Image (cartoon, rainbow, N blue to C red):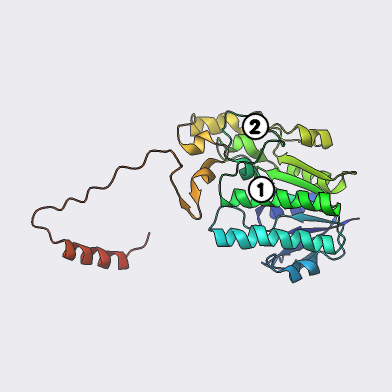
Amino acid sequence: MKTILMTGAAGRIGTFLRPELAGKYRLRLSDNRPIRDLRPGETFARADISKLSDMLRVTKGVDAVVHFGGQSGEHDWDHVLQANIIGFYNAIEAARRNGVKRFLVATSNHAVGFYRCDQTIDHRVYCKPDSRYGVSKVFNEALASLYADRYGMEIFCMRIGNVNHAPIDRRRLAIWISARDMAQLVTLGVERPDLRFEIVYGISDNFRAWFDNANAYRLGYRPQDRSEVYAEEILKRDGPPGNSPADIYQGGGHCMAEGETRSRLAGAPAAPPVSKRIAPGSNPAARGKSAARARKGHRS
């Protein structure tokens, strides 16, 4: 039985996958947070992916790395840099130094999030990241490609949509993947022979998908679940798409993310300026002091 290192194992995807992979592999679970509910066949190795020494320790003696570690959504640049760029380098470099050839990359649909929802794209399109997080995933794919070509590592990049029990809204009807389909994709990435560098989409058999996942099917992926069984209920609740960027671009709200805040898209109309007229007889200085006092007593 193969020993698989799963980084970021305390996160959402790792939590979904652990029961699905139980009995197939010996799972070495790694995270900077403790995992205490270990099952038979699982061990825990605490590690910080921002430290190469930690990654050299946990990648030793494994047959494959399934890399889910890092920041899982948009954040400020320093955080993304440490977790998803430096951290990813440490993970793949440690695997290389320890002779681990098979490496699975949890990339993201946000690496291509600025394609429109009325487009269908495959794994060969050029990247159009929708956020700093998306940029980090483009970096992951690029560095993984280098390690495949230069060092002969066997790389399986999964542009994951949304792993959940069921799709939760209209957008996720296109990108949802069930836990058992995600586990099948991971198993394919671990077991597929003659692998060098491949990019596939991590989605179930979704009728409304924006992604042509023919490359995953070519490699043997056969998803068992479909988002369409949830469509009627979701569309009844959510209604048709509107004209916001989140409805136009595949990346949804990430297309308007700026660190931990929201920003205006380039070319979008600016909000009208707030009027600064002062009512006759008012005292601006006094009003400023009152506002300051109010702010001290309330934070939203």
Asked where in the image residue 287 lies, by quadrant, the reply is bottom left
Asked where in the image residue 48 lies, by quadrant, the reply is bottom right
Residue 209, numbered circle: 2
Quadrant (top left, top right, bottom left, bottom right) of the N terminus:
bottom right
Name which of mark 1 and mark 2 comes first in the sequence: 1
Quadrant (top left, top right, bottom left, bottom right) of the C terminus:
bottom left
**Above or below, 225 relative to 93:** above
Question: Closer to the observer: label 1 or label 2?
Answer: 1
Q: Residue furthest front?
A: 150
Residue 23 visible in the snapshot: no
Q: Is residue 245 left or right of residue 122?
A: left
Secondary structure under badge 2? Answer: loop
| The one of 162 and 38 positioned closer to us in this rendering | 162
Asked where in the image residue 197 lies, by quadrant, the reply is top right
Discs 1, 2 touching: Cβ within 8 Å: no
Residue wearing tag 1: 138
Secondary structure under badge 1? Answer: helix
> Picture coordinates of residue 207 (x, y %)?
66, 28
Q: Residue furthest left?
A: 281
